Image (spheres, rainbow, N blue to C red):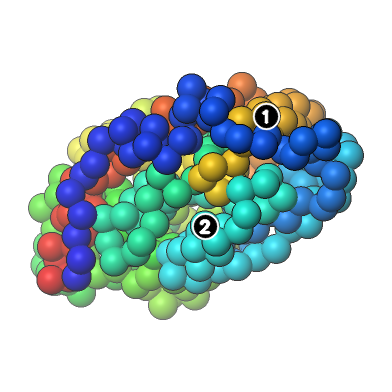
Amino acid sequence: MKKRTLMTTTAALAAAGLLLSGCADNAGGSGEGEEFPTQDVRLVVPWAAGGSGDLSARTLAPLLEDELGVSVIVENRPGANGSVGYNWLKEQDPDGYNLSMLGAEVATLQFMDYDIAPADYAFLGKILEGPGAIAVQADSPYETLQDLIDAAKAAPGEITYSSPGVGSVWDNPAQGFQELAGIDLTNVPFDGSAPSIAAAAAGDVDFSIDAMGSQKAQVDGGELRYLAVLSEERQEDYPDVPTAKEQGIDLQNASFTGLMAPAGTPDDVVQTLSDAITAATQDEEYQSVIEQSNLVPVTDSSAEKFTEFIQAEEERYGPWIELAQSKQD
């Protein structure tokens, strides 16, 4: 399997013209004598319908329409750990009319057998984040995280977990969990959080590691049960769920979702889109929907701040991805 050495993202992004300071020289802007936007905007969700990323896109779209004055059409293009949607976006004209949702995968796929890297995109803004959690089927014999660890130690490689894909935002902390606990688990990847979580609820795998908010419906419906939340402190809505750290595993991980455009999108278009995203996330309706999903709306992001955030994510996840790859080689 092809591997890439962890690159310095700042240099890569600057080379691609993604940093705002490098966008000023883009020729043509949104079109001479033409203000952006003048036509519908397509917003691709690179995951299956039903997950938190899909929910946020469909909640955000009408608010973006109000800000931009054009229709925002949401379209799911799931598959291959998000790379189907990400590759589609790479091939579009950098004019601001084709966008994609993104998660941590955009910073991690470069370390696997994908020709996708942050330098391929212009980052517009982060719209939500939320802690991860480990959840088991409601009638699972595992009552605590230690129960799960003990079972994994007794049967190396036989305990399974579902994830939205190898090297995804939730496969990576699973690698950290294994390293910290000294266990060997088997990943069963799916094309997105919704089918991944459904597999755990059906008992097809031993546990799910995903966004706490994405697991919420199955937990509240009695299909899943939280074993641990991957945050520094317990969550207000689930005060009886201990953190992994309380149970001896010092692991924290949060999901995030944002929006991006193809690399080379003119700086004025990036700014217009970023401003629209910021305004939309400040809407009370949007915040209410996201909070009801046990996620945290991000209301103060920007293209520049989000680009810097992606840089840090790439540097953080690199070692975990290499660990996951080493198990498959």
Q: Which mark is residue 268?
A: 1
Residue 233 left/right relative to 270: left
List x then y, in percent, for residue 11: 31, 33
| Residue at the image point whose x is 38% and y is 70% from the top | 189
Q: Secondary structure at mark 1?
A: helix
The residue under label 2 is 90
Q: Quarter of the image for the C terminus: give it.
A: bottom left
Q: Position of residue 13 (x, y in %)?
A: 39, 36
Quadrant of res 265? top right
Q: Determine the residue positioned at 57% across, 33% down.
A: 26
Front residue of this view, candidates 268 and 98: 268
Q: Residue at x 77, y 47 (%)?
A: 61
Residue positioned 76% across, 51% down in the render: 41
Q: Quarter holding the N terminus?
A: bottom left
Check whether the beta carbons of the residues at disc 2 and disc 1 lie within 8 A of each other.
Answer: no
Give above or below for 220 relative to 235. Answer: below
Give the residue type at disc 2: Lys
**Residue 112: percent from the left, percent from the top?**
27, 61
Work out how far the residue at label 2 is from the one at label 1, CA to CA, in angstroms: 19 Å
Q: Is residue 305 visible?
A: no
Q: Percent from the top left, x then y, of residue 92?
A: 60, 58
Above/below status of 296 relative to 118: above
Q: Is residue 159 above or below residue 301?
A: below
Q: From the viewer's perspective, is 239 left or right of 180?
A: right
Residue 246 bears which disc, if any? none
Crowd class of label 1 (few under 14; some 14 to 19; many from 20; radius 10 Å): some
Of residues 318 and 247, the one nearer the viewer is 318
Q: For this view, does 234 lie left or right of residue 68?
A: left
Q: Earlier in the sequence, mark 2 or mark 1?
A: 2
Type of residue at label 1? Asp
Q: Give the class, few, some or many, for how many residues have Cα within 10 Å of label 2's Cα (few <14, many ≥20).
A: some
